[in-house]
């Protein structure tokens, strides 16, 4: 799709060559991924679960918005949806998906897409992942928000009537929170997690799913609802280290208070 984004900078780099790059040629700010360097994309970020029908038409099943603490935050803790989220972006994203379909002649395939919508209304794709929806079953936020089970809709080739769906939705914000153990904490050193204490951060939990941290750094996925975005903003600032019990009390103190050590 590079011909659609001729002004978008990206450069493939071998990891061993990364430190030898002439930085004067790089149009900062950029994002470095293993190991592509690409222009930092500004704008509101959305996540889409969709499939392409037998005739190649895009069928949007989920539409979530990503929430950040600040512009440098790259965490994926909070995603949410609402009437407003769908109304502000559905038509533009559907047009974008039609463009993808025309390039690749996609049919009968599920797809997960992350995009940013800039202030001019232009969509820039961040990630396009075929053959899946939002990972670790977070796509099921749609079940709570507007009654769509993305997997069921795909296998039955059902098409949501978004006009009716949005009309019937309430005015709540529906969100999921991915609670993760971040480095430098070793997941193997976590003895237990205070799930009860973490639950106290939510006003209304729709479902609380504990995860096996041996297999994944995510220790819980929480589906929840609230009347506005204040709860989500607070959740973005919750120090998850405070609910982890780690082998060795001295290790725990250092991790929890690395900026302001206590006795």
Image: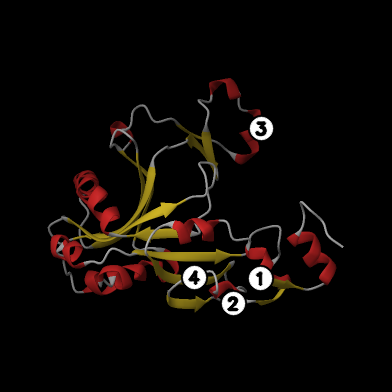
Nearer the camera: disc 4 or disc 1: 4
Q: Tell me whether circle 2 and circle 1 mark residues in contact (CB < 8 Å).
A: yes
Q: Where is residue 226 in the image (x, y as percent from the top left)?
A: 39, 66
Residue at image position (52%, 38%) is: 31
> Along the polypeptide, which appears first: circle 4 or circle 2?
2
Picture quarter with the C terminus:
bottom right
Residue at image position (82%, 71%) is: 249
Residue 57 appears left or right of 219: left
Q: Mark 2: few, some, or many residues within 10 Å (few <14, many ≥20)?
A: some
Q: Mark 4: few, some, or many residues within 10 Å (few <14, many ≥20)?
A: some
The residue beneath circle 4 is: 202
**Distance Cα–Cα, label 4 vs label 1:** 15 Å
The residue beneath circle 2 is: 195
**Distance Cα–Cα, label 2 vs label 3:** 42 Å
The scheme the figure's colours follow is: secondary structure
Tag 2 secondary structure: helix
Q: Position of residue 92 (x, y in %)?
A: 22, 45
**Distance Cα–Cα, label 1 vs label 3:** 38 Å
> Along the polypeptide, which appears first: circle 4 or circle 1?
4
Q: Mark 1: few, some, or many residues within 10 Å (few <14, many ≥20)?
A: some
* Residue nearest the viewer, comparing 208 with 133: 208
**Distance Cα–Cα, label 4 vs label 2:** 12 Å
The residue beneath circle 1 is: 243
* Residue nearest the viewer, comparing 28 with 103: 28
Tag 3 secondary structure: helix
Picture quarter with the N terminus:
top left
The residue beneath circle 3 is: 19
**Distance Cα–Cα, label 3 vs label 4:** 44 Å
Tag 1 secondary structure: helix
Tag 4 secondary structure: loop
* Residue nearest the viewer, comparing 225 with 246: 225
Q: Tell me whether circle 4 and circle 1 mark residues in contact (CB < 8 Å).
A: no
């Amino acid at each position: 799709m590079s011909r659609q984004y001729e002004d978008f900078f990206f450069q493939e780099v071998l990891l061993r060559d990364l430190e030898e790059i002439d930085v004067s040629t790089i149009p900062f700010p950029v994002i470095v991924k293993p190991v592509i360097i690409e222009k930092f994309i500004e704008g509101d970020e959305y996540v889409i679960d969709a499939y392409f029908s037998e005739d190649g038409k895009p069928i949007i099943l989920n539409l979530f918005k990503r929430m950040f603490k600040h512009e440098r935050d790259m965490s994926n803790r909070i995603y949410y949806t609402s009437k407003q989220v769908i109304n502000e972006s559905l038509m533009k994203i559907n047009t974008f998906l039609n463009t993808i379909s025309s390039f690749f002649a996609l049919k009968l395939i599920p797809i997960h897409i992350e995009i940013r919508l800039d202030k001019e209304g232009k969509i820039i794709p961040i990630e396009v992942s075929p053959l899946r929806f939002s990972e670790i079953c977070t796509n099921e936020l749609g079940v709570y928000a507007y009654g769509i089970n993305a997997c069921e809709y795909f296998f039955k080739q059902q098409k949501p009537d978004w006009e009716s769906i949005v009309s019937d939705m309430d005015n709540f914000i529906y969100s999921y929170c991915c609670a993760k153990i971040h480095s430098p904490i070793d997941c193997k050193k976590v003895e237990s997690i205070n799930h009860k204490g973490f639950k106290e951060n939510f006003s209304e939990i729709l479902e609380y799913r504990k995860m096996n941290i041996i297999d994944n750094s995510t220790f819980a996925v929480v589906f929840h609802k609230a009347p506005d975005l204040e709860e989500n903003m607070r959740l973005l600032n919750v120090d998850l280290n405070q609910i982890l019990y780690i082998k060795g009390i001295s290790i725990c103190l250092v991790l929890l208070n690395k900026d302001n050590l206590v006795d």
